[in-house]
């Protein structure tokens, strides 16, 4: 069985009791034809439409989530189209989410250097320069480099 989401807009001219009966009619239609109702959500309620439908500026929104075989959609659509109090409807097949996102790569984080270690590092650098042997430049080499620069 597939999961579906049915959203339909009911004419606001319909009274509350008649509207409840209409919602119950469609939930029973789904149950009688082998479907399972997961949720009926009327929390959207009465809302202004983006554009007038059949000269109606407002509509009452109902969202129903259900599981049913694929053949049930045609029967639901047929009943929704027959009813004059239904302004618009939409049935969407819900897909199960699959992980298509690659796992996040863990990158090494730079470790901050403590002040004590940072202060000790220049001393180490100075110590290393003292340890390195200095090369003596002969007088002949100094004279040759002086001649080349002139």
Image: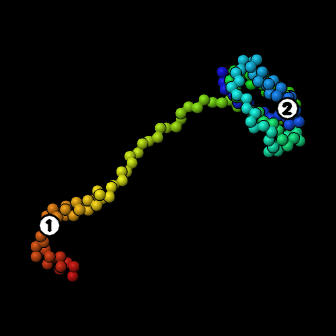
Give the distance between the C-alpha atoms of the residues marked 2 and 1, in whole angstroms.
99 Å
Question: How was this image coloured?
Answer: rainbow
Occupied quadrant, residue 125:
bottom left
Lower position in the chain sequence, tag 2 or tag 1: 2
Identify which residue is drawn at 12% across, 70% down.
136
Occupied quadrant, residue 58:
top right
Q: Quadrant of the N terminus?
A: top right
- Residue 117, horizontal then vertical, whole percent: 29, 56
Q: Nearer the viewer, mark 2 or mark 1?
A: 2
- Judging depth in this view, the residue of 118 and 86 nearest the camera is 118
Are there few (<14), some (14-19), or many (20+) residues within 10 Å of tag 2?
Answer: few
Determine whether, in the image, residue 60 is placed left or right of residue 38.
right
**Element at label 1:** loop
Residue carrying label 2: 16
Residue 78 visible (yes or no): no
- Mark 2 near mark 1, Cβ–Cβ under 8 Å? no
* Vertical relation: 19 (above or below) 68: below
- Residue 85, horizontal then vertical, whole percent: 86, 32
Residue carrying label 1: 134
Are there few (<14), some (14-19), or many (20+) residues within 10 Å of tag 1?
Answer: few
- Residue 29, horizontal then vertical, whole percent: 78, 21
Occupied quadrant, residue 70:
top right
Identify which residue is drawn at 76% across, 17% down.
32
Determine whether, in the image, residue 77 is placed left or right of residue 68.
right
Identify which residue is drawn at 46% across, 40% down.
104
Q: Quadrant of the C terminus?
A: bottom left
What is the tally of numbered marks visible in this picture? 2
Identify which residue is drawn at 19% across, 61% down.
128
Determine whether, in the image, residue 38 is placed left or right of residue 137.
right
């Amino acid at each position: 069985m597939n999961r579906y989401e049915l959203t339909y807009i009911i004419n606001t001219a319909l009274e509350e009791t008649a509207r409840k009966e209409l919602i119950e009619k469609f939930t029973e239609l789904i149950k009688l034809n082998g479907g399972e109702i997961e949720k009926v959500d009327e929390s959207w309620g009465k809302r202004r439409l983006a554009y007038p439908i059949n000269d109606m500026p407002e509509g009452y929104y109902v969202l129903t989530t259900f599981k049913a075989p694929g053949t049930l959609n045609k029967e639901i659509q047929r009943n929704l189209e027959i009813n004059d109090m239904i302004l618009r409807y939409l049935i969407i097949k819900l897909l199960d989410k699959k992980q298509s996102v690659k796992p996040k790569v863990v990158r090494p984080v730079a470790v901050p250097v403590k002040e004590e270690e940072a202060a000790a590092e220049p001393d180490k650098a100075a110590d290393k320069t003292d340890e390195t042997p200095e090369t003596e430049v002969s007088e002949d080499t100094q004279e040759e480099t002086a001649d080349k620069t002139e």
